[in-house]
Image (spheres, helix red, strand yellow):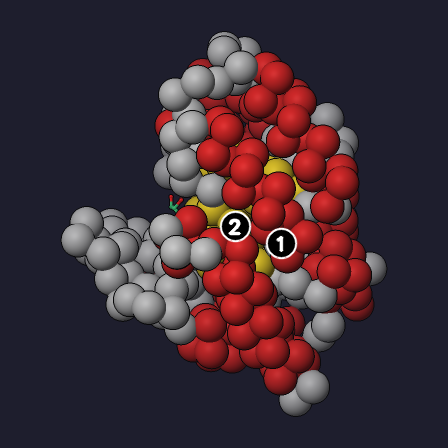
Amino acid sequence: DRTLLPYEKRAELTSNSIAKRLFTIMATKKTNLCLSVDLTSSTKILDLVQKVGEHVCLVKTHIDIVEDYTDNFIVQLKELAQKFNFLVLEDRKYADIGHTVSLQYSKGLYNVADWADCVTVHSLPGEGILKALNDSAHSSRGVFLLAEMSSEGNLITPDYTEATVKMAAKYPELITGFVCQKKSTFKDPSLIQLTPGVQLESSKDELGQVYNTPEKVILENGADVIVVGRGIVSAKNPEAQAVVYKDTLWKCYTKRVSG
Ligand code: BMP
C-alpha cells in the first residue's frame, strides 16, 4: 500500500526530480497543502502567496486567468517560491496533439516551460503529448497526468483511467504523479496523488465541483498533496484558514502513516 509509506521514504524511490523535491518539501515543512491561487489580479495573487507561502508545499496557478500578466509577476512569484520553499504547478491541462502542446508549453506570452516546476496534462490525445513534453522540458520538470476529475458527470471512464496510468509508466523521468480521486487508481509509491475537490465548509459548488473532507481524501482515497482553492482564497481570513487546512490535512497524513 503506497499510502502507508512516509513522504521522506517515497522521495528516495522516485525517478522524477520534481516528485523528489515535492516529497522532501512536504516532509521538511510538514505540509501537504497545495494552494490553488485562482485569482485574476497579480497583486492579489502575490499578496495571498506572501501570507500563506510558509504553509504550503505547492502553489497551483491558472496563468491564463491573470488579467495583468507581466514577466515581473513571474519573477516575484518565483522569489516567493524561493523564500518559502514551495514549488509552482501551472494547471494548464494541456490536451492537444504533441506538436501544438510543445508550442503552448514553451512559446507564447506565458512561456510556461521557463518558470513552472510542473504542469497538468490530459492523456486524451495519446502518448504524443508526453513525448512532446519530454522533448521540450528540461530535467528538473514534472507532469501531473489527469487520471480522474472531481467534477460531477465528467466523462472519464475506468478504462480511460487505467490506460492513463499505463501511459505514465513509460515516462518515469517526466511524470510527477496523477491528478486523481481514488487510492486504487495507481500503486507506484514513487508517484504523487494530487487531489482537488476539498473544502471544509461546503460539499459542492453551482457548476459541478464536488468537495470531500480531508479525512476522506487522505485516509480513504489516498491523496498525498491536497488542492484547496476557494476554501482558502474566499475565506474571510485566508491566512488563518490556510493554517486550519494545513493542520487538519497534516494530522490526517500522520494518522495514515502511523498505521
Ligand atoms: P476549488 O477548491 O476552489 O474548487 O478549486 C479547485 C481547483 O482545482 C481549480 O483550480 C480547478 O481547476 C482544479 N481542479 C479541480 O477542481 N478538479 C479536477 O479534477 C482537476 C483540477 O485541476
Please tell me in which quadrant of the rendered image residue 50 appears: top right
Q: Quick one: 103 or 250, which is closer to the camera?
A: 250
Tag 2's secondary structure?
strand
Q: Taking 72 as reference, is 227 above or below it?
A: below
Which amino acid, by three-letter code, is at mark 2? Leu
Cα gap from disc 2 to disc 1, whole angstroms: 7 Å
Mark 2: few, some, or many residues within 10 Å (few <14, many ≥20)?
many
The residue where tag 1 is placed is 56
The residue where tag 2 is placed is 35
Residue name at image x 40 percent, y 63 percent: 198
Please tell me in which quadrant of the rendered image residue 138 appears: top right
Give x and y (percent) for residue 237. 45, 56
User: Count of labels shown?
Assistant: 2
Give x and y (percent) for residue 244. 52, 68
Please report contact status of discs 2 and 1: CB closer than 8 Å, yes or no: yes
Quadrant for the N terminus, please. bottom right
Counting residues from the N terminus, which is met first, the one under dot 2 or under dot 1? 2
Mark 1: few, some, or many residues within 10 Å (few <14, many ≥20)?
many
**Residue reaching furthest top?**
108
Which amino acid, by three-letter code, is at mark 1? Val
Quadrant for the C terminus, please. bottom right
Please tell me in which quadrant of the rendered image residue 148 appears: bottom left
